[in-house]
Image (spheres, rainbow, N blue to C red):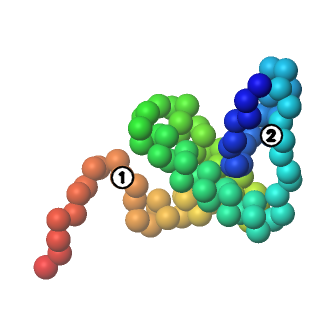
């Protein structure tokens, strides 16, 4: 049997799923600083996958990583929502599709 190398952060149930396929996962638990770094890498990965696929599934993966980053940095989902709402109220969103060319 060949060995597949990954060297990346995976979802919590992935080792169990690998075992269910009759294979043995080799993994370690990351320390906090390394975890934060790997979450940033995972966010980049998920954004690239969304940009290629444009699916709701990939957007959900982006959200999953964003929420994990919030939790790892000590923020709650509600705090993220509050900051989002404050910024949205002050600066608006992107619903009107405004593309700024320049300002004079």
**The one of 11 and 81 positioned closer to us in this rendering:** 11
Q: CA distance from mark 2 to mark 1?
A: 34 Å
Find residue 24 and report its image quarter. Answer: top right
- Is label 2 or label 1 in front? 2
Identify the residue position indicated by label 2 in the image: 12
Question: Above or below — where is 19 with respect to 28?
Answer: above
- According to the picture, the residue beneath numbered tag 1 turns out to be 94
Residue 52 lies left or right of residue 103; in this view the side is right
Q: Residues within 10 Å of mark 1 (few under 14, many from 20)?
A: few
Q: Is residue 75 visible?
A: no
- Mark 2 lies on a secondary structure that is loop
- Crowd around label 2: few <14 · some 14–19 · many ≥20 (10 Å): few
Furthest-front residue in view? 1
Left or right: 100 with respect to 36?
A: left
Among all residues in the image, which is located at the extreme bottom?
Answer: 104
Q: Secondary structure at mark 1?
A: loop
**In the displayed structure image, the side of residue 90 where residue 33 appears, left or right:** right
Q: Residue drawn at (55%, 48%), measured in percent from left and top? A: 45
Q: Residue 16: percent from the left, percent from the top?
A: 85, 30
Foreground: 4 or 67? 4
Residue 2 locus on image (x, y percent):
73, 30
Disc 2, disc 1: CB below 8 Å? no
Furthest-left residue in this view: 104
Precedes in sequence: disc 2 or disc 1: 2
Residue 82 visible at all? yes
| Residue plotted at (80% across, 20% down) | 21
Residue 39 image position (x, y, % from top left): 67, 56
Q: Which of the 4 image quarters holds residue 102?
A: bottom left
In this rendering, is residue 56 above or below 66?
A: above
């Amino acid at each position: 049997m060949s060995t597949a190398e990954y060297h990346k952060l995976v979802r919590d149930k992935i080792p169990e799923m690998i075992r269910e396929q009759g294979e043995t996962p080799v993994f370690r638990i990351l320390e906090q600083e390394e975890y934060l770094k790997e979450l940033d890498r995972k966010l980049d990965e998920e954004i690239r996958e969304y940009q290629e696929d444009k699916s709701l599934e990939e957007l959900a993966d982006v959200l999953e990583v964003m929420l994990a980053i919030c939790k790892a940095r000590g923020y709650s989902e509600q705090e993220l929502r509050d900051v989002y709402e404050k910024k949205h109220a002050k600066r608006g969103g992107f619903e009107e599709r405004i593309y700024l060319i320049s300002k004079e």
